Image: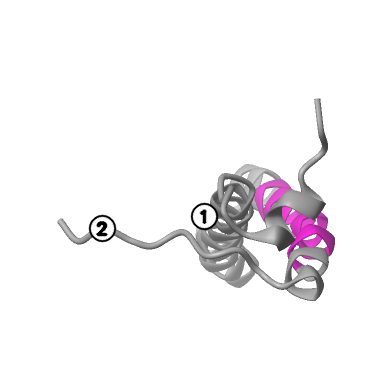
Amino acid sequence: MATSKRVALAPRAVRQLRRIRPVYLGGMLISLLVLVLQADRDAGGRQAEIAGVFLPAFTALFALTAVRLRRHERTEHCSTAKKLTPSV
């Protein structure tokens, strides 16, 4: 398995990732709500198909964002990461 290098992100990239997390989470919740509401109706609805595509897409994007932010926080050698990490 290839090892990946931890690289701190630029402050602008970190802010963008933190801002987009609620959008992905909201998309996941709306897609899940549509799937639940369409389950009561007939199973062949087009809205259910679209929501079925969007739910894994938003889930994957949210997970990717969380992983990138987590990897950035774990970077200790970079001054950007040191500035953005709250001191305990």
Label tally: 2
Q: Where is residue 51 in the image (x, y as percent from the top left)?
A: 61, 63
Front in this rendered view, residue 61 or 70 = 70
Name the residue located 59 percent from the left edge and 72 percent from the top edge.
46
| Label 1 – label 2 distance at C-alpha | 44 Å
Number of other residues with Cα within 10 Å of mark 1, as a class: few under 14, some 14 to 19, many 20 or more? few
Name the residue located 54 percent from the left edge and 52 percent from the top edge.
71
Front in this rendered view, residue 6 or 27 = 6
Q: What is the chief secondary structure element of the magenta stretch? A: helix
Q: Position of residue 16 (x, y in %)?
A: 80, 70
Front in this rendered view, residue 63 or 81 = 81
Magenta range: 17-34
Label 1 close to label 2 by CB (< 8 Å): no
Q: Position of residue 8 (x, y in %)?
A: 60, 63
The N terminus lies in quadrant: bottom left
Q: Look at mark 1 in the image and give the residue it sits on.
A: 43
Q: Residue 27 carries which label?
A: none
Helix, strand or loop at label 1? It is loop
| Residue 25 shown in magenta | yes
Q: What residue type is labelled 1?
A: Ala
Left or right: residue 16 versus residue 38 is right
Number of other residues with Cα within 10 Å of mark 2, as a class: few under 14, some 14 to 19, many 20 or more? few
Q: Look at mark 2 in the image and give the residue it sits on.
A: 3
Q: Position of residue 27 (x, y in %)?
A: 73, 59
Within the image, what quadrant is residue 11 found in?
bottom right
* Residue reaching furthest to the top: 88
Above or below, 11 against 85 in this view is below
Q: What residue type is labelled 2?
A: Thr
